[in-house]
């Protein structure tokens, strides 16, 4: 599972996210993973789509305020 993938704003769109996600995917495949599942932000979705991932389902985040 990849989580909190982030490229510093000053260095985006230079291929760093792609290199990182490809390395993580390769490492997971070497350990036997055949399927990957990610939850993505808008930026993340754009990156993962560029790397060949497909959108499975749109999700809706929700939270329960503690004191309301
Ligand atoms: C998502 C994120 C990690 C991408 O990192 P990055 O280093 O800029 O990614 P890359 O340079 O490897 O991008 C590769 C391709 O993905 C696509 N892409 C990446 N970010 C994109 C964006 N914001 N909008 C549209 N396409 C995007 C493009 O096709 C890009 O190729 P191009 O620059 O030649 O057009 C970065 O935008 C980020 O840190 N965002 C804030 C945190 C976040 O939302 N993380 C994702 C959590 S799921």
Image (tube, helix red, strand yellow):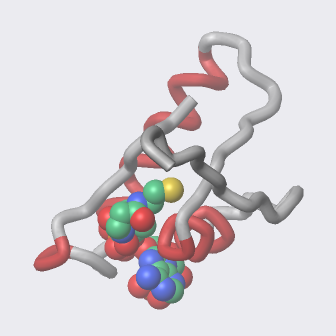
Q: List x then y, in percent, for residue 50.
A: 62, 73
Total number of numbered discs in the rendering: 0
Q: Classify residue 10 as left or right of residue 52.
A: left
Q: List x then y, in percent, for residue 38.
A: 65, 45
Q: List x then y, in percent, for residue 62.
A: 65, 53
Q: Above or below — where is 50 with respect to 1?
A: below
Q: Residue furthest top?
A: 31
In which quadrant will I find the N terminus?
A: top right
Question: As rendered, which of 37 and 52 lies closer to the eye?
Answer: 37
Residue sitting at x 38%, y 54%? 19
Question: As rendered, which of 68 and 6 lies closer to the eye?
Answer: 68
Q: List x then y, in percent, for residue 27.
A: 51, 24
Q: Above or below — where is 30 with respect to 48?
A: above
Q: Residue furthest left?
A: 10
Image quarter of residue 35? top right
Residue sitting at x 59%, y 23%? 28
Q: Classify residue 3 as left or right of residue 12.
A: right
Q: Classify residue 34 as left or right of residue 49.
A: right
Quarter of the rendered structure image containing ligand 1: bottom left
Q: Above or below — where is 26 with respect to 60?
A: above
Q: Above or below — where is 30 with respect to 57?
A: above
Question: As rendered, which of 56 and 25 lies closer to the eye?
Answer: 56
Q: Residue furthest right?
A: 56
Question: As rendered, which of 42 and 49 lies closer to the eye?
Answer: 42
Residue sitting at x 73%, y 61%? 60
């Amino acid at each position: 599972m990849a989580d909190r993938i982030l490229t510093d704003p000053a260095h985006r769109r230079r291929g760093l996210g792609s290199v990182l996600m490809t390395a993580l995917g390769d490492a997971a495949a070497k350990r036997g993973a055949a399927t990957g599942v990610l939850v993505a932000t808008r930026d993340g979705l754009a990156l993962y789509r560029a790397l060949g991932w497909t959108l499975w389902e749109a999700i809706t985040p929700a939270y329960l305020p503690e004191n309301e």
